[in-house]
Image (tube, rainbow, N blue to C red):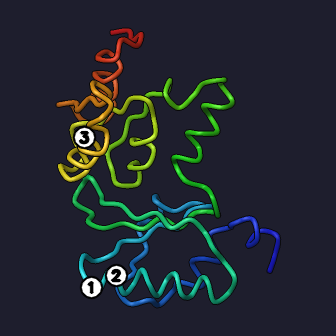
Amino acid sequence: MSAACAAGDASHWRASLAGIPDLVPQPAAQQSRWKASYLLPDGKAGEAAFSEAERRLAAIGLRPSMVRSRGVRGEGALLDVLPPGITKVAGLRRMAAMCGLTLAQVVYAGDSGNDTDALLEAGRAILVGNAPPELKDLVRSRRADRDGSVFVAAACDLAGVLAGCRHFGLAVRR
């Protein structure tokens, strides 16, 4: 295996996953050197495609992070294949440590299923308006013991993030 493959270059994953029925690569704008992104159908077909992807990667000794989520703009089920151990929550932990913060001091904003773990681990969570209702319900229910730690914005995207920052008393210039 080449150094790039060992480090997690996504071209190797794309080659290994090519031809899996119902595993459709997302447009080029969603791909990168380190991330392979796919569309999955819902239900049994999506489960079968995900299982086959796991099987193929394991068969060649690769164990990348496989992050499933739902699109926020009608894409349906999504799959991101990333280098081993690389996820949004891993990045959140690293950034907090680099800044000398605990996760309890961190505010995280998200809008999709691939944000779930980070939304649950951060001290406070902002769900922007375009987040799917299922994600909003999940985060609110799993954080119910942390009163006041979740803000669900009416506004979408950056406007929702800014509304959440204002809600939590963070400095935001208008």
Residue drawn 63% across the image and 73% down it:
63
Q: CA distance from mark 3 to mark 2?
A: 26 Å
- Left or right: residue 3 compared with residue 111: right
Task: Provide the secondary structure element on which disc 2 rests.
Answer: helix
Coordinates of residue 20 in the picture (x, y in percent): 44, 89
Residue 121 spot, x, y in % from top left: 45, 40
- Give neighbour class at mark 1: few <14, some 14-19, many 20+ (Cα, 10 Å): few
- Residue 68 numbered tag: none
Which amino acid does the dot numbered 2 rest on? Glu
Q: Quadrant of the N terminus?
A: bottom right
* Circle 1 residue: 44
Q: Position of residue 89 (x, y in %)?
A: 52, 46
The residue to which callout 2 is attached is 47
Q: Which residue is mark 3?
A: 140
Quadrant in the rendering for residue 26: bottom left
Q: Secondary structure at mark 3?
A: helix
> In the rendered view, does 80 fall on the left or right side of 111?
right
Q: Give me the C-alpha separation between circle 1 and circle 2.
A: 5 Å
Q: Residue at x 22, y 60 (%)?
A: 74
In the rendered structure, are the residues bearing label 1 and label 2 in contact, judged by CB atoms less than 8 Å apart? yes
48 sits left or right of 36 in the view: left
